[in-house]
Image (cartoon, grey):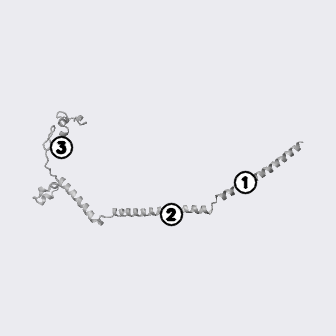
Amino acid sequence: MHRKEIAVIERKIERLEWSNNDTEEKRQIQVQLEKMIAEKQSKPSYANIKAEHAGFQVRYNELKDLKERAAERYKVDYKKWRDFSEWSFTNDDNHPAEKKKRDHESIMRKKQKMMYFGPDLAQFAGEDDENLKDPEAATTPCRRPTRPPPPIGRIDVEGDKENQEAKSIYPGSFAQITSHIISPTSHQVDISYFSY
């Protein structure tokens, strides 16, 4: 009996295997069929392809126009900066009027400074050339006629418009500040009057 039961079970197992093979085969065929249907549906028709091509053509033309405008703008900018570069690195020989004007302005500024800070050559106008060759005489600056500074502790108000204006802005306190800042008895400066 034992052998009979084993044989029956083996047959059942064989039947199940055959039925499973059929189901497996059916499932594989079904998957292949679904793939074929999906491929067929995914393939566009001629009308769809033509419409898509027209859309791409319009977009291509827009991009082409944009590229041409950008190229024109680039050419204009490139020409402008090339001209600027040429101008900025050229020698002054190519622009004599501008060079002459700059040189003249520079010379005039130096002349004004020399007249103010330089030696007073008017005193040598009547003397011989030997004194002019003396380096110490030529480089000694002349003293300009200026008023002497006011004595410490008081203010020389005559002709001093800045101090008069300051007195009118701060009446009464200006003289106090100047008289108390530096006292003749101490060598310290009182800075309490400078805080506002």
Residue nearest the observer in this picture, 77 or 149: 77
Between 193 and 113, the one nearer to me in the picture: 193
Q: Give the tally of numbered discs.
A: 3
**Label 2, label 3: how far apart the Cα atoms are:** 75 Å
Q: Secondary structure at mark 3?
A: helix
What number is the disc on residue 30? Answer: 1
Structural crowding at the residue carrying mark 3, measured as other residues with C-alpha within 10 Å and reported as few (<14), some (14–19) or many (≥20) = few
The x and y percentages for residue 22 are 78, 52
Give the residue drawn at x 74%, y 52%. Answer: 27
Tell me residue 147's x, y (percent): 13, 46
Mark 2 or mark 1: which comes first in sequence?
Answer: 1
Please, is residue 19 above or below residue 157 in the view? below
**Residue bearing mark 3:** 162
- The answer to the question of whether label 3 and label 1 lie on touching residues, with beta carbons closer than 8 A, is no
- Whether 47 is drawn above or below 157: the answer is below
Specify the label residue 61 is tagged with: 2
Picture residue at 12% right of the left edge, 56% below the top: 122
Q: In the image, what residue occupies the spot 37% across and 62% down?
A: 80
Which secondary structure lies at badge 1? helix
